[in-house]
Amino acid sequence: MAIQLPDLDTKTYEEISGEMVASISKYTDKWTNHNPSDPGITILELLSWIAETTFYRINRIPPESYVNFLRFVAGTSGIDEVEHLLKDPHQDRHYRNILEFLKEIEEGHDKTIAEIKTEALLFLASRYRAVTEDDFRQLTIESTGQFGVKVKRVIVKKNPDDYKVEIIVVPDKWKQYEELTEADKWDRYRELVGFVEDYLKPRTLIGTKIEVKQPVYSEVSIDLNVVCHHYAIPEKMERDTKERILQHLDPFVGGDEKTGWPYERPLSVYEIAQVVEGTDGIKQAGSIMFDGNKELKIKTIGGLIKVDSLNVKVRKEEK
């Protein structure tokens, strides 16, 4: 069904001029002479004439101009070029749709202006072209799906200084990945990174550099003492406290937004204390130590967090 765009050529010169003169009072009460002899009114009448002329011309763009715009959007013209692009079995489905539509035009089939507008707008509204961070994120997930890897999170970092976009792919465990050696893991990841880059490069704007990476994990060991209420069971409080901490530091569901630990965000003992004291049955968080260092209050994180060890000692409050 064709998208019906609004008809812009609906107002006459008199209507446009009348609206402009009537709006003067919204901006100033010092302009009181609205007669045609006033120089300001003359300027408004000139602008009204230009507006009416522009609206008239917009509604009368030659059909061939719409076809040329469609060719520009598709980035190709001529039946030979279109057919060559359609031979690629890995072509994006949104791009394939506009190419097939353009092929019918190049073969001589007539299309209405409304149909051409519809096809161009549908393609421009699709995620074929990566512009926003969400575009990069969704297209990366789409590409890894074709690679056969279940990706649970994609982190996009933009550097405006050098027009570089860093994409960190955090896949869920794929088949037998955990049983591979470190060298084999890197080879497998490098294959995934290359596939994503090849998928994204033709979809980025000219001048945009992309770099697909595997996530960096910073190991941390946590030791803490907590005080629970007298009615709580210490063994249960230990389990619940560990579960809440691990969940908060999780790369997929951690952080305040529950969307994964923010990439490269430092970890502080005060944040851990807040998480612990939010556990039902816990009265107070006592001492908290990172990596066996009592003086370390804020730990620098290079990417995501990998908890190397988590020790929780629970004691009941004194009555």
Image (spheres, grey):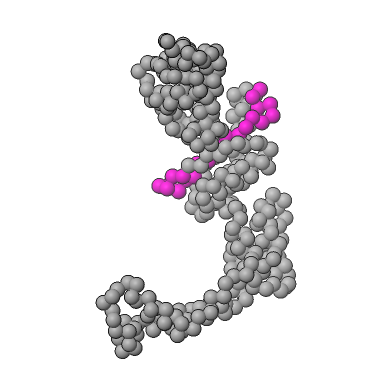
Estimate the x, y position of residue 247 in percent, counting from the top left: 54, 27
Looking at this view, name the residue that lies furthest to the left: 30
For residue 144, above or below residue 17: above
Residue 54 at least partly seen: yes
For residue 117, above or below residue 147: below
> Which span of residues is magenta-colored?
158-179
Residue 78 at least partly seen: no
Residue ID at (62%, 32%): 172
Q: Quadrant of residue 297?
A: top left
For residue 89, above or below residue 271: below
Task: Report the front residue among 235 and 203.
Answer: 235
Quarter of the figure that contains the N terminus: bottom right
Estimate the x, y position of residue 166 in percent, counting from the top left: 50, 41
Residue ID at (44%, 80%): 16
Residue ID at (45%, 33%): 264
Residue ID at (45%, 48%): 163
Estimate the x, y position of residue 18 in percent, counting from the top left: 41, 82
Looking at this view, name the residue that lies furthest to the bottom: 37
For residue 205, above or below residue 271: below
Q: Quadrant of residue 86?
A: bottom right
Estimate the x, y position of residue 305 in percent, counting from the top left: 50, 27
Task: Report the front residue among 216 and 8.
Answer: 8
Decide if residue 163 is on the left or right side of residue 25.
right
Decide if residue 167 is on the left or right side of residue 319.
right
Decide if residue 78 is on the left or right side of residue 169.
right
Total labels drawn: 0
Q: Is residue 43 magenta?
A: no
